[in-house]
Amino acid sequence: MKTRRFAILAVILGMAFSASAQDVMESKYGADSVNCVTKLSIYREYFKQWEAAKFAPESVSGEMISAWREVFLSCPRASQLTYTNGEKILDYLIRKNPKDKDAYIDTLCMLMDTRARCFPTDPKTGASQVASIMGRKGLLIYTYNKNRYEEAYNVLKEAVALDPSQLQGAFIDAYFKATIDMVNNGKEEKMTIINVYQELTDVLDGNIKVHAEKETQLVEARANAEESGDADAIASFDKQIEKNEKSIYNYKGVKNNLDNLFQPYASCEDLIKVFSAKMAETPDDVVLLKRITTILDKKECTDSKLFLDASMKLYELEPSPEAAYNIGVKLFKEGKNGEAARYFEEATSADNNDRVFRAYRNLAYCYLNTNSFSKCRDAARRAAAVDPTSGEPYIVIGLAYAASANSMSDAKFGGKEAYWVAVDKFIKAKQLDSSVANRASDLIRSYSQHFPATETIFFNDYAEGQSYTVGGWINETTTIRAAK
C-alpha cells in the first residue's frame, strides 16, 4: 500500500524533494522565472474557467493540473494562491480517486507543509499564520480519512501549542473528535479527553472574549461614523460587525458541540473517579486543581467532597477570584448565602468572562435569598452586561420584584403592581434566551395570576393597557394588566 502511495505521489509531484530544495531559493519565481510565469499563467487561466463552472468535475483540465504542479515544484514562493487553489485541485483528485485518496492526502500534507515554510506570515497583514495552516492541515486529514485520526490529532495538537488564537472553530472541533478517537482506540488515557476539553474550552472563551471586545470597538466606531454622516464608513462597519458577530456565533456553536461530545465522558461519577486519583498523586498541582474545580462546576458536580477539597486547596495555594468562586459555589449549595456572597464578590474580578458572569449571577441569587432586593438587581444587571445574550439575569430580577410585592402594602394596588414588572422581566428573558424559555413561561403563568383584579384596576381610576410607573426601589414603568 505504501509503495502504491509513493508511486502516485511521484506521478503527482515528479521529484518528491524538489519542493523542499526549492524552499531555500530566494527568487520568488524560482531558478527558471520564465517557465514559472508561463506555467502560472496557464494554470490560472484554466482555474478561472473551472471556477466559473462552479468547480464542476467535467470542467477540470489536465493541463491545469500539470501547470499547477509545475508551479508548486519550481516556484513555491510565487503566490499563496498556489496553495489555496491547490487544495481545490487535490480535493477534486481525492473525490475522483477514492481508492488512492491516502496518496493524495499525503500530497495535500506536503502542500500545507510547504506553504507554512514559504509563507509563515500573511503577506497582507504580516501576522504569523503557521498555526492556522497546521490547523487546516489537521482538519483536512481528519475530514478526508477519519482512520488517520492519530495523524490529525498530532498535527492539531501542534497547532494549538503554536498559537491557539489562530484556530478556527472547525479546527478545534476536529481536534476534539480526534482526541476522542485516540482514547476510544486505547492510544490515550481518558484523562486526555478531560484535559483537551478544558484546553479547547479556554481557547474558545478567549476567542469569544476577543471578538466581544472588538464588537464594542466596532459599534462605537460605527456610532461616530453615523454622527459624522459618513455613509461609506457606516456600511464598512456594518459589514465588519456582521462578520464579527458571525465569528462569535460560530465559536459558541463549536463550544456547544464540544459540550455535547464531552457529555458521555462527563458523568459526575466518572469525573470524580478520574480526578480523585489524579489529585491523590499530585495534591499541590495548581493546574490540575483549576481543571478539577472548573469542570466539576461546569458539569454541576459541586456537591461532591472532591469539589470542596480541591477548591479549598486551590485557594490555599493560590488565592484568586477563580478559587474564591469555587468556594462560593459550595457555600451557596449549603445555603450559606452571606458567606457565599463574599466569595462571589471576590470572584467578579476574574479574567474569564464566563466565570465573571456566573459570579454576578450567583451573587444576585445570594442577595435574593437574603431579601437584599436592590443589591440583587444590581448584581443581575452586572451579569447581563457581561453576557447580554443570557436571559437568566432577568429571571433573577423578576423574582426579586415578585418577592418584594408583600413589602409594598402602601402602594395603590397593594403591592400587586410588582408582579407586572416581574412578568416583564420574565418575558424579556424568554425572548432573549431559549435556554430559559420554559422556566420563564412557567413563571409568567404563575405570577400573572397575582395581577390585580379588573375591578381593582377600575376603582383606582385606571384601565388595562395604560402605562404605570411602579414606585419604591423598583421605579420602573410597565403596562397595567388584570389577572385572568
Image: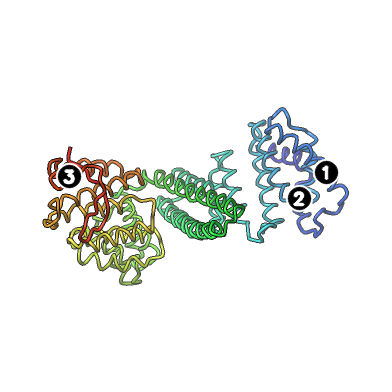
Residue depicted at x 67% and y 39%: 88
Q: Image check: 290 left or right of 25? A: left
Comparing labels 2 and 1, the label whose residue is closer to the camera: 1
Instruction: Give whichever of discs 3 and 1 has the lower sequence position.
Output: 1
| Distance in Å between CA atoms under marks 2 and 1 | 20 Å
Q: Which residue type carries mark 1?
A: Lys
User: Can the viewer see residue 352 in this picture?
Assistant: yes
Which element is circle 2 on? loop
Of residues 26 and 128, the one drawn nearer to the viewer in this rendering: 128
Quarter of the image for the N terminus: give it. top right
| Distance in Å between CA atoms under marks 2 and 3 | 80 Å
Q: Position of residue 237 (x, y in %)?
A: 56, 54
Residue 17 is marked as 2
Q: Image check: 479 left or right of 34? A: left
Q: In this view, does 425 lie above or below 290?
A: above
Q: Which residue type carries mark 2?
A: Phe
Q: Position of residue 32 (x, y in %)?
A: 87, 51
Of residues 459 and 37, the one drawn nearer to the viewer in this rendering: 459
Which residue position holds label 3?
Answer: 451
Instruction: Say which quarter of the image contains residue 408.
Output: bottom left
Which residue position holds label 1?
Answer: 39
